[in-house]
Image (cartoon, helix red, strand yellow):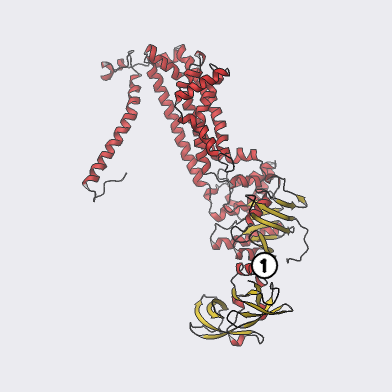
Amino acid sequence: MSALPPYATPGQRVWFYSFRVICGLIFFFLIAPIMVIIPLSFNAQDFFTFTPEMLALKPEGYSLKHYKDFFTNSDWQAALWNSLRIAPMATLLSVSFGTLAAIGLSQTHVPFRRTIMAILISPMIVPLIISAAGMYFFYSRIGLQGTYLGVVLAHAALGIPFVIITVTATLVGFDRSLTRASASLGADPVRTFFKVQMPLILPGVISGGLFAFITSFDEVVVVLFVGSAGQKTLPWQMFTGLREQISPTILAVATILVTVSILLLATVEILRRRSERLRGMSPG
Amino acid sequence: MTQQAPHDDFVVFDRVQKSYDGEILVVKDLNLSIARGEFLTMLGPSGSGKTTCLMMLAGFETATHGDIRLGGNAINNIPPHKRGIGMVFQNYALFPHMTVAENLSFPLEVRNMGKAEREGKITRALDMVQMGAFGGRRPAQLSGGQQQRIALARALVFEPELVLMDEPLGALDKQLRETLQFEITRLAHNLGITVVYVTHDQTEALTMSDRVAVFDDGRIQQLASPDTLYERPENSFVAQFIGENNTLSGTVVELADGKATVRLDSGDVIATTAVNVSAAGDRTLVSVRPERVEYNVERMKPDAFRLQAEVLEFIYMGDIYRTRVRVAGNDDFIIKTRNAPDQRRLKPGETIEIGWLPEDCRALDA
């Protein structure tokens, strides 16, 4: 954003400053609710409010007891363990299928590619509650409801659109003559895929995978329908915690999740920059 | 090498046709044999089918009809990666995530070659294109000309007998193009490899090739050595496409012993060499190369055919003079003369006498 030019009219001046105010407000409404949680999670009391000690910044107003509760309570640990068992498997499936789908759908000779793409992306657009209800009835029929595999498959279906979108975007910059060059040098299609195509679209694959991971890790609606008590994930436990216990441990968990998410998204950003650099490097 | 030279038919296109949509033939009935060690160029305007032919030979396109043979074996059903044909692309197609040495190592690793052997071959290939010091660089750190040298080294490093080049110098500036033209021909001859080269640049085709196949409209219009192509074009497309050319339209009056007497549309009657006119009464385009026309009466041969011309434009180009004259109703008749101490500089508006030998003047299809 450049400075206000000397010839600006009063109208432009007003807009110049109100634009900044609007931007500030947007950021405030987006970030403030999350930022409030972080200090509250260090509350020494079992309340969701700032105690007078906390406001006075006295050390006795703060403690790590909610974090300790999270790491010792068997309910929370089981939920964490479930999330860690489900999310990576769902991510793995999303990445494998999503990448293959994106590569297949980027070939111009595939019939109905736009329609197929729309169907694969639909879990991202259809309201979650509808997908969840549909999956519940479908998985009940085929005996997947309430199983680990069922939840993993459901989360994979939710993650695939992210992978397809990011990988398709990277493929746009992929030079097709590279696969031809690879073939002319004697590499079979499998070798060409792993040695030439994969390294170049890897940033797209990884960022798609991170989105898929976060989707599974944060998801509560589908798992409530498709899962059973044995697949109680972290978000599910938080949901129950809010409804039944109102324990500030939720705030500690939320803080941990926010930190993890920020770290993951920072990784995405670093990868995106790397991919741009590589694409700028690719000739032609 | 001339058209009549004996071939051992290393690469053969046998009645090959190609259609992308099942209706329009992009390549129509192509027959072509290429000898071992030959440098053959496919030359033609865009859309003439030359690149399609190259891609069929490489295996990236399949022939709709006919056979393509390499060393006597039909290769129609062999996938590209098993053909063992080197290829150089217009946009270089170097792998951006690998260093130069890794790019060259790739075809050798595919062939399960040991590390020591690989390194030896990579060093030799890089030295061959004078890029020995660049093994550790990435393609993005090289200029266009350097990248194309690496692409060339990569296509040669696994010692293929046949190398295809698809307009490899198209993206480079003129000076670099000329240097690399020379280097590619030198390498090809030293290594004894067969090269099929695609270009739309006729100068490139003439300077590099043993033989040139001129493509237009999915067919080979003429297949000949560069000098034959330039001096004895067989039809008016080739005459127009290769080099600069003056054309005069007229009607054949008499045809005998390979000589045709042509009445130009202006009424002048001239003697020509008959090339592809079949009978008196045929419409014809008479073609004369600009450098075969003389206006200095002292230099004219006694049997030269002479015509009156009016000078419209005279351009001093350093090594040559380029004169545009009006002759027999044609305003775009160009004469190129060498800059010599005894050569006269003309002025627009002057009326001069120009002349050429009947053998330099060819009656082609209209």
Query: Eyeballing the image, is B29 above or below A164?
Result: below
Q: Which residue is mark 1?
A: B226
- For label 1, the crowd category at 10 Å Cα-Cα, with few meaning under 14, some 14 to 19 and many 20 or more, is many
The chain carrying label 1 is B
Count of labels in the image = 1
Q: Position of residue A186 (x, y in %)?
A: 67, 44
Residue B64 is at least partly visible in this image? yes
Residue B131 is at least partly visible in this image? no
Q: Pick whichever, A53 or A215, lies toward us.
A: A215
Q: Residue at x 49, y 36 (%)?
A: A166
Q: Residue at x 63, y 45 (%)?
A: A182
Q: Quadrant of the N terminus of chain A?
A: top left
Query: Eyeballing the image, is B239 above or below A28?
Result: below
Q: Amino acid at mark 1?
A: Pro
What kind of element bears circle 1? Answer: helix
**Residue A21 as seen in the image, left or right of residue B14:** left
Query: Eyeballing the image, is B13 above or below A190?
Result: below
Q: Pick whichever, B271 or B224, lies toward us.
A: B271
Q: Position of residue B366 (x, y in %)?
A: 63, 71
Name the quadrant containing residue B207: bottom right
Q: Pick whichever, B44 or B218, lies toward us.
A: B218
Q: Position of residue B71 (x, y in %)?
A: 76, 52
Q: Residue at x 56, y 35 (%)?
A: A101
Name the quadrant containing residue B242: bottom right
Q: Position of residue B282 (x, y in %)?
A: 66, 74
